[in-house]
Amino acid sequence: LDYQHVQVPFEITLWIMLASLAKIGFHLYNKLPSVVPESCLLIFVGLIMGGIIYGLNDRSPPVMDSDIFFLYLLPPIVLDAGYFMPSRPFFENMGTILLYAVVGTIWNVFGIGFSLYGICQVKAFRLQDVSLLHNLLFGSLIAAVDPVAVLAVFEEIHVNEKLHILVFGESLLNDAVTVVLYKLFRSFCEMPTIKSVDVFAGVGKFFVVGLGGVLVGLSFGFTAAFTTRFTKDIRVIEPLFVFLYSYLSYLTAEMFHLSGIVAIISCAMGMKRYVEANISLKSHTTVKYFMKMWSSVSDTLIFIFLGVSTIGENHEWNWPYICFTVIFCLIWRALGVLVLTFFVNRFHVNTITSKDQFIIAYGGLRGAICFSLVFLLPDFPRKKLFIAATTVVILFTVFVQGMTIRPLVDLLAVKRKRESAPTVGEQIHIRFLDHLLAGIEDISGHWGQYYWKDKLEYFNSKYLQKILLREYDQPKSSIVLLYEKLERKHAIELAEAGQLGHGPTHPSLLHFGFLCSNDRTVRADRKLDDTLSPVVLDNMKEILARNLYRSRRTGPAYNRHTLPGESEPTEHAQEILILRHKSF
Amino acid sequence: LDYQHVQVPFEITLWIMLASLAKIGFHLYNKLPSVVPESCLLIFVGLIMGGIIYGLNDRSPPVMDSDIFFLYLLPPIVLDAGYFMPSRPFFENMGTILLYAVVGTIWNVFGIGFSLYGICQVKAFRLQDVSLLHNLLFGSLIAAVDPVAVLAVFEEIHVNEKLHILVFGESLLNDAVTVVLYKLFRSFCEMPTIKSVDVFAGVGKFFVVGLGGVLVGLSFGFTAAFTTRFTKDIRVIEPLFVFLYSYLSYLTAEMFHLSGIVAIISCAMGMKRYVEANISLKSHTTVKYFMKMWSSVSDTLIFIFLGVSTIGENHEWNWPYICFTVIFCLIWRALGVLVLTFFVNRFHVNTITSKDQFIIAYGGLRGAICFSLVFLLPDFPRKKLFIAATTVVILFTVFVQGMTIRPLVDLLAVKRKRESAPTVGEQIHIRFLDHLLAGIEDISGHWGQYYWKDKLEYFNSKYLQKILLREYDQPKSSIVLLYEKLERKHAIELAEAGQLGHGPTHPSLLHFGFLCSNDRTVRADRKLDDTLSPVVLDNMKEILARNLYRSRRTGPAYNRHTLPGESEPTEHAQEILILRHKSF
């Protein structure tokens, strides 16, 4: 027996296997996941395993290595989140998201930090050795809402798209703030004196970290898109580039102390559109599937490790400090959301209701990022207290808030996600309004989101598409595509019902189809096809294609465990539609 | 800048990126890959990179770590090979393959070992310190044909399926022999005296290593199939199990000093059929695609590393030893193939022609396995000589034989792979003959392959399918399936040509289709459907389903870089057929 030799890959494989089997196990009992979020169950499994390891070895089980977490477990989840980010709601609410992510996080950090420092001044609590800087450092790591935890809970409760993107977007973009503040306070802790210039450098650094992340991400994203222009002869390695470039963007950002999360999200969002058009359908299925799979496994492992790491002897218990941490986390977040939303609502027509505000505040879950950051702290006497407080906050938010948020959403009757995809009519209206608003903004000289969107779209079709797409072609109008899709779906339905008429020549069949058709839409379409000359039709198509954006399927809100469109009954037809898409 | 922190994943990602970009680069110039095999180009890239590293650092570039090779690079390639193994030709030629793999490899090991020992006795060559045991050890590592190298060359020359499977199967199955002999001679080298009991133990060990590998592989394979029964609710992690279980089978086999290659191949071949039936179509696409991608990357990395590792100072040059190694490798392989084929041809009707024999002998390429094994040797004075000789043999076989085999195949007019898939008629005949032969074998009391195949099929449908498949159902007859496929293909073609008739009620459409059809087959089919009552039809289907094996698409011979059916023009139809397959 030669276990040493294969130990590393063997144990990694076994952990992943355990995680996957645990997932299957939960889903075998359908009732369980509908009551308890999966993240709670996984932490619970982790706790049990940690207990077993602790009991057997009589020493603390290994804690989750922060390096492993940040280098291997986090990127797949963030990549998945970025790639499947519904871009329209994201950009529409960009301002609000950034406000929550930047101002909100800073508010929380200082609020929690200062008020905990206040608690430390109470002599009875015996915490006077915890300095203000240490409290702020602790605040910087505990304040940030965790994307992994938020995703795990929010994808199960199906709130409306705007609410979802507000909480989720915040949890992703606050990474830049967290990175800056955490590193700032850490270095302050090690400095003998702090000059005011350091503080200003910190503020400047925030912009560098955030915008630098975006830049790194976009450049890798566009390189990825450009690379996939040349993969036509070796389809099989196409999916690889999506993963390689986004991972490189993350690592590069981390290397330069920029925000890796922001980088990988920009990379994914930047390349998605072009990569999708360049690679084959099967490659794209593989990319999507593997992203989902990978992020699902990462997320499972993170929660299990979180549970395992909780058990052990690296905690120092101090009732007042830990209780007040939980309370302050809740209070400051609630206050922050209230104040910021007050300003947001003054500038927006589409306001955030008080119910939504409650869910945003209540959905501020903490997770593995805090946990990894607290273990990365340099050693100082109260580190174990911080670890204990962080663990309690995470478990409290994930278990108490995570388990009660679903009943609360039901109770408050928060607006839910719409189940059906928008109809063609709606899509046309939305696009029409976009153009109209862009025109109005242009005329009135107001550089709003529609103006920029229009400019970006122009720049995209004028330059980017020509460089990044293999076969650059004016995209077909989505109406034409939809018509083709209906035709194809219809054909398959007929074939499946065994009712396929065999082909007479073109015009006669059209008439025949027209005559015996019971379906009004198809008849109208046929009539159109029949009565208009091909030239007129082509003209119409061209006008439509030139004047409408290319339709992107605006899928339902993000969900880690299913691929968009997976559960739709018309899957066959869609499959073929996409195939057809490619073949043009 | 914090490079240390991200070094490991960053460098791995960069290496993979380099490999993938090199692959794209070759394919941009279409002429190059058609003359020079990709493996040669990759080694060449590796040589250049090694030269650059050597020039810059003034010390040998790092050699490929044997652990990395055996634990991370080899398994994906073997898994891919096993999963896409065309099982019919493999099992039909099992006897011959095993003869080549076992007896042939032993023949080569001892042939090369003893004759090199003879060379060492020539005083002028100054090699008298190389003992017989060391020569045999060297023989054991240099004798084995390498699956990676064979695949890389044979998938580009498209020889007939039987020839391909003979060389490829041998290269896979000789692993058990290589493992045993290599470890045997290695331990003999370290023993003071060798008893005859050790030699017999070695012979016994061969069976343990080989059959143990098969057992480990099959048990993991069946567990994998069993696990995928329960993944219906979480489709997204289905592909994971295929990879996890096969990797575990490899690692477990390695842990117990069994043949990992044999284990992973048995695992892949054992689970394929059931996993395919259990998992969703998209999961299956992902599995196939990712396997191809992974093996393609592994294989690229192996050849690049092979090139990089060649440069450096770990060689000891000795003209006679190295030249004679190359010559003996060629001679003993040629002799072995001649002798073994002589016996094979005496017992088979379908003989191996002398052209085929030449290609089998000439296709005995050596590759990275030898290279890794020679670096794993314990340190002794002549290790560097062995490394040099191994490197030369590999480069000679890959470059000279690899580049000339294609012209030779053309010149000798070796029978090529048939391009088209077998027709329905052929498939029915083949299956009919299988049953007939099984019956004949049963009556005559001869337990031949058909007899065993029949028994296995019985056992499979009686027990295995019931345990391993989620929705166990008597499989549909392939004729019924084919009919449905044609229908669907036809429907899509009509829809694409815009000629879809719209649905009248069932009987009238059938008549209409029948009347205006020009296509005889479809007409005949329709007539059948029309004239026979549903009960009679169902009866027919049931009889067909019960009495014919389920048709497996017998794809064209193995090719690493394309998925079966990828290039077929009727892709749409196939896609739908498979969808349909699932929906039953």
Image (cartoon, coloured by chain):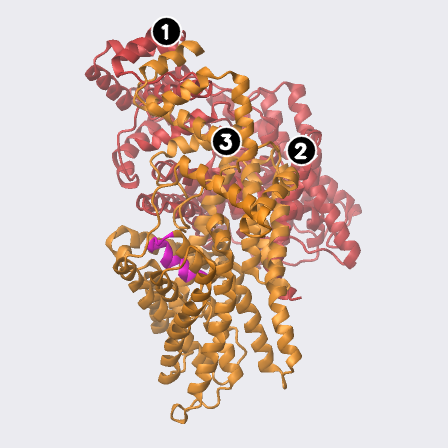
Chain colours: A red, B orange
B576 vs A211: above or below: above
**Can residue B178 be seen in this snapshot?**
yes
Mark 2 or mark 1, whichever is nearer to me: 1
Looking at the rendering, which quadrant does residue B53 occupy?
Answer: bottom left
Q: Chain of mark 1?
A: A
Which badge, 2 or 1, comes first in the chain's sequence? 2
Query: Height in image: B82 above or below A343?
Result: below
Task: Inspect the image, locate mark 1, and give the three-letter code of the amino acid beneath it.
Answer: Cys
| Residue A54, percent from left and from top | 76, 54
**Which image quarter is the N terminus of chain B in?**
bottom left
Between the C-alphas of marks 2 and 1, the distance is: 56 Å
Chief secondary structure of the magenta portion: helix
* Residue stretch in magenta: B147-160
Query: What is the number of the mark on residue B581?
Result: 3
Judge left or right: residue A428 versus residue B462: left
Q: Would you say residue B153 sits in the magenta stretch?
A: yes
Q: Depth check: give the residue in front, A317 or A582.
A: A582
**Which residue is tagged 1?**
A516
Give the secondary structure at mark 1. helix
